[in-house]
Amino acid sequence: MDILAEETLFVGTAEAEHVEMYLKAIWHIRERGEDVKISIIAKMLNIRQPSVVQMLKKLNSRNLVEYNKFGVNLTEEGEKIGSSMMRNSRLLEVLMERSLKIEIDEEMVCGIEHHMNKQFTDALCVMLGHPRKCPHDHDIPMGECCKSN
């Protein structure tokens, strides 16, 4: 029997994950009430500032951020992606702590959050009882499934 006929393997798209991490970082910085600065993004993502500038220009050209000399803001689409990433990671943290009763592993959360689609995220949220806060006491962005409750 051909093993490839049974199973499909997926190679993650590093570029998409990279974009999502920037948008999540910007979303999180803004959530903390801070101005979004290149230096803060660089520190949060452990990336050099020139690389952050290069990526912000790319995100600007994709209409995910508004980046200019006045600062960095998420566009509507960037906001949607950033919020979705925060929702995914915070729901995973709740799952690990409350349901699986394991220590929260941020590296694992970061690896999984990029591969969660809306159906999976909403099912996880429903299963967890629509938590409003993560174990770190941050708000979990609401999904469509939360609005019907």
Image: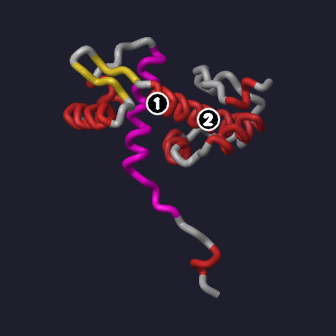
* Pick the front one: 115 or 99: 115
Q: Is residue 47 above or below residue 134?
A: below
Kindly identify the amino acid type of the residue bearing the numbered disc 2. Glu
Q: Is residue 62 above or below residue 2?
A: above
* Pick the front one: 27 or 75: 75
State the separation of the CA atoms marked 2 and 1.
Answer: 25 Å
Q: Residue at x 63, y 26 (%)?
A: 134
Q: In which quarter of the image is residue 59?
A: top left
Q: In this view, does 126 lie to the left or right of 91?
A: right
What residue would you read off at disc 1? 77
- Magenta residues span 10-32
Residue 29 located within the stretch drawn in magenta:
yes
Residue projecting furthest to the top: 33
**Where residue 95 sits in the image (x, y, percent)?**
68, 38
* SS at circle 2: helix
Q: Residue at x 42, y 21 (%)?
A: 29
Q: Residue at x 36, y 27 (%)?
A: 65
Query: In front of the other: label 2 or label 1?
Result: 1
Kindly identify the amino acid type of the residue bearing the numbered disc 1. Glu
Label 2 environment density (alpha carbons within 10 Å; few <14, some 14–19, many ≥20): many
Q: Are dots 2 and 1 in contact, CB under 8 Å?
A: no
**Where residue 93 sits in the image (x, y, percent)?**
61, 35
Q: Residue at x 55, y 33 (%)?
A: 84
Report whether residue 46 is seen.
no
The type of colouring in the image is secondary structure
**Where residue 108 sits in the image (x, y, percent)?**
53, 46
What residue would you read off at disc 2? 93
* SS at circle 1: helix
